[in-house]
Image (cartoon, grey):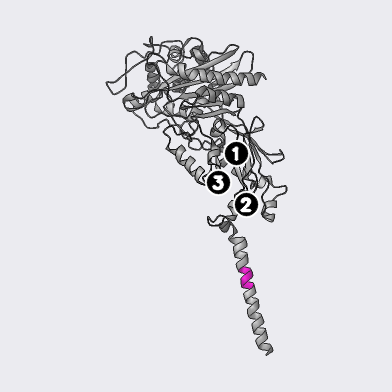
Amino acid sequence: MIRYIRRAAGFCLLLLLALLANAARVQVFQAESFDHNPANRRQTIARYEQPRGNILVDGRSVTGSADTGQQLRYERTYKQGPLYAPVTGYASQTYGTTLIENAEDDVLSGIDPMLDPIPFWSDITRSRQPGGRVATTIKASMQQAAYGGLAGRRGAVAALDPVSGKILALVSSPSYDPQQLSGTGKPVIDAWSRLNAQRTQPMLNRAIRQTYPPGSTFKIVTAAAALDSRAVTDIGAPTGIREPYVLPGTTTTLPNEATGCDDASLEYAITWSCNTVMAGLGVKVGLSGMTDTAEKFGFNDTGLKIPSGVAKSNFDTRMSDDQLALSSIGQFDTTATPLQMAMVAAAVANNGELRRPYLVDRTMRSDGDVISRTRERTYEQSMSAGTAGQLRQMMIDVVEEGTGTNAAIEGATVGGKTGTAQHGLGNSGTPYAWFIAWAQADGATQPAVAVAVVVEDAEANRTDISGGGDAAPIARAVMEAALRKQEG
């Protein structure tokens, strides 16, 4: 009898060990896979059982949380949602997260290990910390100036601090209210369908996710390449590029909107936006030199993050000379985001040194203790300091006597470049109006801001440079706000 009892006891022990092993397998080794199983709603319920951390602009929250009393308890809310949508993105219980809401989701939702009071606390206790806070680099006055300037027209604005790389304004228009997508149910689904069906694409972040032909604003890049390569040694001397200019290897003549471009100097060509001179200089520099300079400004970078991903701005690396000529004036396959063109203006303003752009200044615990801070870094020395100095003066001439006089600001030095980008079949579409610029207060030791503006539905008069008429006043309003902020 005792023998049978021992056998039964041994069998029970084996069953107990098997049960413990299986429990360890489920709770330890496979815990992560079960946590992330779509059929497991516990993670989703836990995610929304506490308020989400807030995103800050100028130290004030532009987001919040509302207690719905439902199973997914706390729903995201937004203050001035359309104004800040290109910065915050949305946090939706139905459609997930985008932009900062996505890039800083671990901090905002309270699962980032840096939020723990002691290392591994959340792993040990299986708990979630209160949502942290994310402070952006955006300046409210500049954001409002950009948003108000576009006034619902399709387009975008990006503004940078040239010295630090901080993104001071990031606006896309038309915009949308991300709170419409926050919760669950039919209203959210209907809002999603309605927003995605609109021809104007209000959820498209045109400032960082849409690329446009940059038109004549790209001539600043071409001028930098010409000066650094020594294709031009005297900005006031004739370039030897005659008008009419026939694209290499073709019988096609490149037109000018401006007059006086025949054998014009680089200085004149930038001030009055001569296509022939800049196209000829691009060919003279050559494909390798043009590509190298463009990439030093950020073109062809597929990995730029601010921390959200930025669409690649394109400058082809394989082209014939006629294509290179067109690319050198911002046409053919050359495309750029507004952020990219703000980077071009920023590099000129900052003695040729391009700082890496960033949108998040710091992240914090719910009590305000800083857990991380973005370090300012150099992206690239885009051009020599001497070249930058010459380009600054040429951009100043554009504003003081050329095509960008609408950007002039009393009490400040402003440099700019207009652009009218052709598009559509046979260039039949309404041209995009561009303006890039930088501003420095009189007596200040460093520039306050660099800005790029694109207006898609510009009413361009082909006898005028639409960038100066449509985009320059918006840039001026943003720069004025930056100068007031700097003085304050």
Checking the image for residue 168, the label placed there is: none
What amino acid type is highlighted by mark number 2?
A: Ala
Q: Quadrant of the N terminus?
A: bottom right
Residue to which mark 2 is pinned: 46
- Is residue 318 found left or right of 124 in the rendered image? left
Q: Residues within 10 Å of mark 1 (few under 14, many from 20)?
A: many
The amino acid type, in three-letter code, at marker 3 is Gln
What residue is disc 1 on? 77
- In the rendered image, which quarter is residue 123 located in? bottom right
The image shows residue 24 at horizontal and vertical percentages of 62, 65
Main secondary structure found in the magenta portion = helix
Across the whole image, how many numbered discs are drawn on residues? 3
Q: Which residues are magenta?
A: 17-21
Q: Write the residue at 58% across / 22% down.
A: 449
Q: CA distance from mark 3 to mark 1?
A: 12 Å
Q: Say which element carries label 2.
A: helix
Q: Residue at x 64, y 69 (%)?
A: 20
Give how far apart the Cα atoms at labels 2 and 1 are: 18 Å
Q: Position of residue 285 (x, y in %)?
A: 41, 23
Query: Label 3, on which residue?
Result: 93
Furthest-left residue in this view: 251
Q: Which residue: 27% across, 21% down?
A: 251
